Image (cartoon, rainbow, N blue to C red):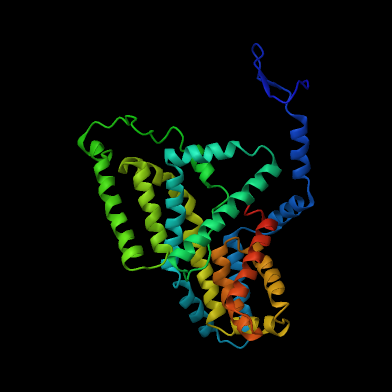
Amino acid sequence: MRELGAKVIKVEPPGGDPLYRADDLDMKAKQVSYQDTWLTRFSQLVARLVPDAISTSILLRAFLVLAALKMGNTLTATLDAYYRGLWMLLPFTMQMTLILVLSSVLGATPFFRRIVLALSRKPNTAFQVIVFSVLLAAGLSYALIIAAHLLKPTSSQPISQFPDSRTLAESARTSEGKIPEEGQDAGGHNYSERFERNRFISTVMCVALLSWLFYHFWIKRASLDLNSLNTVLLLLCFFLHRNVHNFSKALQGAVVSCWPVLVLYHLYAGVAGLIQFTTVGESFAGLLASISTRYTFPLLTAIAGTVVAVFVPSSGGQWVIQGYVTARAAEAVGVTAQCGMLALGVGDQMGNLLRRSGQL
């Protein structure tokens, strides 16, 4: 191997394996330097020590059962609290599942694949990725603030997190060559296949969904919630995929991305039941309030949120588990629940940095 410049040169020797002569040494040095930072090393250590989310949720459940029994709750009352909580998030679980699945299906459309792939070519270094992500998030945040002002605020909390292995960019890469481009012959010859590839069916669905959205926003003057958001995503999926066949093909790959949500939110609901329907939640809230003031409460909440986020790598799951205690402690200290929610969000992001669950 010789150093010939910034461009990778692939050489195919006679009867041998391909050789790579030179890469950009400065780029490699920057990548090694980035990978060798203390934060990356620390997050790798946390990843080795902290089990996966399902295992930690089971350990957390066992800890809360022991805490409830220690605080004087009977075994039957503790089991009843767990059972009550176990089933209280089924509608929310389905809503979050649809958000993940429909977002992946939307990202697999030819239109969004071109956008995602074009954006992925722009950042070339770790620093450019960070700057680009910050600017993109800031721009989307201002757009959402305007949308929230026009559509009135929603009562649901900001909750979403994609699994590391299934992102829009990943869907764009894996779906290449599988979903036919617009106008491409997919090879269907019998009646049912031609029916699936006919745009009329998708058009009917788009008209129906668009009519409901018009009624929801302009006639009822309702706000944007999880149900209407899923309706918008479903409308865009049918419109951009153009037919049911393409939509179904993309759906088969997108369903893989939702498996953690189907189980994890169910387990987190059981944990929330132990906190809310026993004396555990009140005790934890009283403890937090006793060591907090109006000025230190946000900092302590953010620290507690960081610790919980390391073991619960889901914004929605963290709010389900920690939201009750945070709201009750905020009330006891004399601050608003919104203050506690914002502090909890900061802690969630710091925990994601430590666990690498928010890594690109």
Using the rendered image of the protein, determine whether residue 51 is visible from the camera's viewpoint: yes
Side of 175 where 17 appears, left or right: right
Residue 265 position, x and y percent, is: 50, 65
Of residues 192 and 215, the one nearer the viewer is: 215
Front-most of residues 351 and 63: 351
| Position in image of residue 291 (x %, y %) | 73, 82
x and y, in percent, of residue 79 in the image: 51, 79
Q: Is residue 287 above or below residue 114?
A: below
Q: Residue furthest top?
A: 14
Find residue 217 and report its image quarter.
Answer: bottom left
In the rendered image, is residue 161 in sight? no
What residue is drawn where x is 20% and y is 36%? 191
Q: Quadrant of the N terminus?
A: top right
Is residue 67 shown left or right of residue 85?
right
Q: Quadrant of residue 214?
A: bottom left
Numbered marks: total: 0
The location of residue 300, given as percent across then percent down, is 71, 74
Q: Residue at x 67, y 13 (%)?
A: 13
Question: Residue at the bottom extreme?
Answer: 72
Residue pictured at 56% horizontal, 47% vertical: 165
Position of 82 with respect to 341 (left or right) is left
